[in-house]
Image (cartoon, coloured by chain):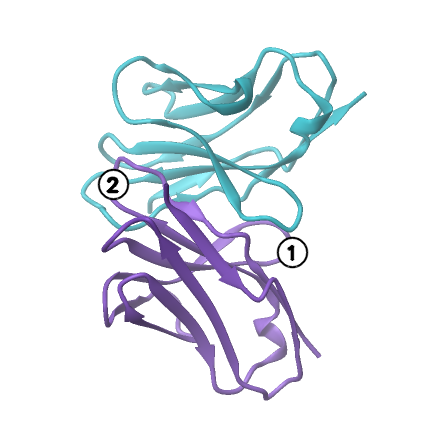
Chain colours: A purple, B cyan
Amino acid sequence: SQTIHQWPATLVQPVGSPLSLECTVEGTSNPNLYWYRQAAGRGLQLLFYSVGIGQISSEVPQNLSASRPQDRQFILSSKKLLLSDSGFYLCAWGRRQNQPQHFGDGTRLSIL
Amino acid sequence: AQSVAQPEDQVNVAEGNPLTVKCTYSVSGNPYLFWYVQYPNRGLQFLLKYITGDNLVKGSYGFEAEFNKSQTSFHLKKPSALVSDSALYFCAVRPPRNTDKLIFGTGTRLQVFP
């Protein structure tokens, strides 16, 4: 069966520090991969998605970037964090359009 | 513009009573429709989907949803609510010809009282 892992579960970082969040998927190949941000326990904002290695689409211009160095690895990064980067970050994978996306358990990022 | 609406921020229901969480969408064509549930500090968990066929679809944990094409709605239902159903529920739509992305509603918090 397929599983998705995100780490760390929680992270507290000072303003201006770098960020690296990692997501890996097991049990499937060539998945679509997604990064979402959820603010205040509510709506989801799609940040990036990828349909293959090295292929990244950005949905919202911002302080973050994403990379996909391997087929089942998706990384969310920032060179300098802002206070507004705080939130709950969720990674998801999907395949065919009539199938659901499957989510990891998220990383809660607090910026001080 | 394509969108999904969940008109209720919160739904309160007594344990044992039926529950409905509403969802309407504005998407051209025949979209794929999904419901997810989120418990505190967890990711979204898939509940059920409508692709085609029978308008009433059944999913996990006794939930079901009714697709109504004329009203462009996909309401989530359960005949008898449990306290453990208390969570945040999201409706999502994948528009036709868009193979990559979901459009999510803003979520409805379900509170089931004992």
Secondary element at image label 2: loop
Marks 2 and 1, Cα distance to the nearest angstrom?
29 Å
Query: In the shown orientation, is residue A71 left or right of residue A44?
Result: left
At x 31%, y 70%, the residue is: A68
Q: Position of residue A45 (x, y in %)?
A: 47, 57
Q: Amino acid at mark 1?
A: Ala
Q: Where does label 1 land, which residue?
A: A40
Q: Position of residue A57 (x, y in %)?
A: 28, 66
Q: Residue furthest right?
A: B114
Say above or below: B107 vs A71: above
Which of the two marks, 2 or 1, is nearer to us in this view? 2
At x 53%, y 85%, the residue is: A18
Which quarter shows the C terminus of chain A? bottom right
Foreground residue among A12 and B88: A12
Quadrant hosting residue A67 = bottom left
Q: Chain of mark 1?
A: A
Q: Where does label 2 land, which residue?
A: A97
Say above or below: A64 vs B87: below
Q: Position of residue A110 (x, y in %)?
A: 66, 71
Query: In the shown orientation, is residue A41 left or right of residue B50?
Result: right
